[in-house]
Image (cartoon, rainbow, N blue to C red):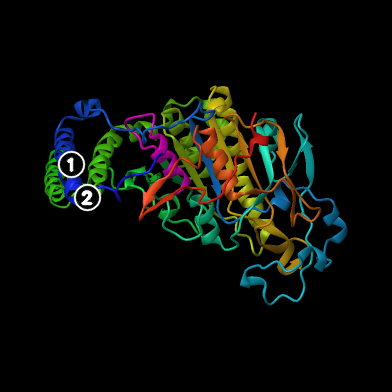
Amino acid sequence: MGTNNQDNVSLSRRGILNGLGGVMATGALSQLLCRPAAEAAAVPANPAGITGFPEFPAKAKRVIYLFQAGGPSQIDLFDHKPLLEKWDGKDLPKSVMGGVKFTGMVNGQSRFPVVASRWKFARHGKCGAWVSELMPEFAKVVDDVCFIKSMTTTQVDHDAAITYIQTGHQIAGRPTIGAWAAYGLGSECDDLPAFVALRTKEGGSFLIDRHWGSGFLPSRYQGIRIGGSDREPVQYLSNPESISDAMRRRTIADIAALNRDHRQRVGDPEIDTRIAQFEMAARMQMSVPELADFSDEPAHILDLYGPDVREPGTYAYNALMARRLAERGVRFVQLFQGGWDQHSNLPKQIEQYSAYSDRANAALIQDLKQRGMLDDTLVIWGGEFGRTVFCQGKLTKMSFGREHHHLGFTMWMAGAGVKPGFTYGQTDEWSFHTVENPVPVHDMNATVLHQLGIDHKHLTYRLQGRDFRLTDLAGDVVKEILS
């Protein structure tokens, strides 16, 4: 189920059939782009995914994934470890550290002193979840949240780890989770993509276009980035200065004719994707300005997200944009936030990025809940790995860093059939090794697809004689966190 048949169809037959499809699709494009805007909007898109999905009733209609690139420190945010107070400044016992390998950035260290969190922890909500004082607003919504404190990954370097959690493989070239969701399910709306990426303007390290790309899937399933600039929410969507609508329509009509000719000659189905993207772009010229106009939002909602919500490109702005996209039928929205790679000066930096995102994280959950959308919207927060209990570099009372840590870190989920007010898994008293209910990356991704009504083993794409999938050859749904 879910495979394409490119390995089993002859080029000549494919070329004939695809050529006919290209003629019809390009003809539709020509009509679309040469019509007035109101008429163009009435031409239906083809937002559907492949046949057969969802396979069973889905708890989640859509996903909002708040990806925190760099590796947030679980020790300072959610994974409370009182023992560390007694060991602060002392070397981590070799019996704990063992032979675990880290990056080359700590190769020259002769000591690995333990660093207890410098921020107070307290229990919150009816569930009694531990949250540090760095996240005061988020602490108010923990009864709606499921913490997973036993995440593990096989990768310890940023790019490989981000690529791995996004695509299921550490080497670039495979589709991201959002692209797989778009491929399997399509979109619920005609005038916006199925997969949208939002990238904040603060802390953008390690994030590049392929982290929301479609890999070997047709490029129509890649994430479309929204939030290019204040003037232009989507880059290259608006007409350039001095180019009229009529001139642009003529230009695109000529491009469509070239695409039609090329499609007939080579039979490349990717040309159909190009045509479909032109159609989507025409629709987005009308839908995106309305999407990006927050003037219809009540004052109390804007206040909920905080003052940054009025500034395009901030975390708060993108969080509200994610909700607006979700309520318009976008299947998978991924907000990318960098800045969590805190190898030095962690106290100042973690305070900065916690304050930058805390209020908006809480606001998003509250906003979705009061609209009745949290019931069928899956919200996910987390990075590619966590941070070490030991110090990297020089340790002073309020200046230190933490190295990458892949053996146990925290993510959280909310909504769409995930148990609220629940904590799953546990690390040891050092927040070093996972000792209870480990959740590998493939299990997390299998669970996300399951909530969308997809068996991760069935959503595949055939390439060069092999059926590929998001979870590669592994993955089990974490049923214990599902209600």
Q: Nearer the viewer, residue 310 or 28?
A: 28
N-terminal label among 2 and 1: 2
Q: Is residue 128 magenta?
A: no
Q: Is residue 192 magenta?
A: yes
Point 28% across, 31% down: residue:
45
Residue 306 visible, this angle: no
Q: Position of residue 419 (x, y in %)?
A: 66, 31
Q: Quadrant of the C terminus?
A: top right
Q: Residue furthest right?
A: 86
Tell me what residue is drawn at x 67 percent, y 54 percent: 73
Q: Please give the residue where the numbered disc 2 appears in the rendered image.
A: 10
State the image quarter where residue 391 is shown. Answer: bottom right
Residue at point 18%, 49% (across, down): 267
Q: What's the residue at 31%, 45% (across, down)?
A: 5
Query: Left or right: 354 with respect to 276?
Result: right
In the picture shown, does residue 71 fall above or below 137?
A: below
Q: In the rendered structure, which amino acid carries the disc numbered 2?
A: Ser
Would you call the spot at circle 2 few (<14 residues within 10 Å), some (14-19), or many (20 or more)?
A: few
Q: Is residue 245 left or right of residue 294?
A: left
Label 1 secondary element:
helix
Residue 119 x, y percent position in the rendering: 76, 50
The magenta region covers 176-195
Q: Position of residue 187 (x, y in %)?
A: 38, 33
The x, y position of residue 399, in whole percent, is 72, 63
Q: Residues within 10 Å of mark 1 (few under 14, many from 20)?
A: few
Q: Which residue is mark 1?
A: 17
Is residue 169 or residue 160 the one in the foreground? 169
Closest to the camera, between mark 2 and mark 1, is 2
Mark 2: secondary structure: loop
* Amino acid on which disc 1 is placed: Leu
If the image is split into quadrants, where does the N terminus sit?
top left
